[in-house]
Image (cartoon, grey):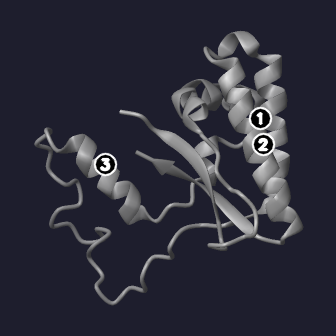
Amino acid sequence: MSMALYIVLNAEEPGFDTFVEGRAVAQAIDDLTGLCEVAGLPLPDEFVGQAADELDEWDEDEDEDEDEADPFDGEEGSPDDDEDAPAEPAGQWFAASEGVAYVQALIELAEENADGLEDLDGVLADLRDYLQVLEQAQAARLRWHFAWDF
């Protein structure tokens, strides 16, 4: 399976190219997460803003062969318990300036820990592409989040 971590902006047509390959970062996500933990940086997943139902679809695909019971099934307080609760927002959004600062810190962290990443060149290429998109998003006063492509 080929996964990618890409950027979503809060504008469908921002006026610039937002494509980032994102596969090298996705493949190195465990290593990047470990480096962030050691350095005291936020974890990349903290900037994933996909709606829960999108991530649940991936979990269902991953777990379709497993026969595990729902830990909330039939319990009061389960996520599906309150039908009158407001709909969950369609994802969390972040200021582009926050993304610029974060990705710059990730680039520095990756460069300082070159031995900790199997595909350093690919990771740095993805990070620099993220940075370019986020700088343009900042100039356009847009918000962003990461999203997973499974």
| Residue type (three-letter) at the residue carrying disc 2 | Val
Q: Earlier in the sequence, mark 3 or mark 1?
A: 3
The answer to whether one can see residue 122 in this image is: yes
From the image, which quarter does the N terminus lie in?
top left
The answer to which image quadrant residue 126 occupies is top right
Q: Is residue 123 above or below residue 56?
A: above
Residue at horizontal 64%, vertical 51%? Answer: 19
Q: Are marks 2 and 3 in contact (CB under 8 Å)?
A: no
In the picture, measured across the screen, residue 102 lies left or right of residue 5, that is right
From the image, which quarter does the C terminus lie in?
top left
| Residue type (three-letter) at the residue carrying disc 1 | Leu
Instruction: Determine the secondary structure under disc 2.
Output: helix
The answer to whether one can see residue 99 in this image is: no
Dot 2: few (<14), some (14–19), or many (≥20) neighbours within 10 Å?
many
In the picture, measured across the screen, residue 27 lies left or right of residue 63, that is right
Q: Is residue 139 above or below residue 43?
A: below
Instruction: Determine the secondary structure under disc 3.
Output: helix
Residue at horizontal 64%, vertical 41%? Answer: 43
Rendered image: mark on residue 59: 3
Residue labelled with disc 1: 106
Image coords of residue 10 (percent x, y): 65, 72
Image coords of residue 37 (percent x, y): 67, 31
> Mark 1 to mark 2: distance in Å?
5 Å
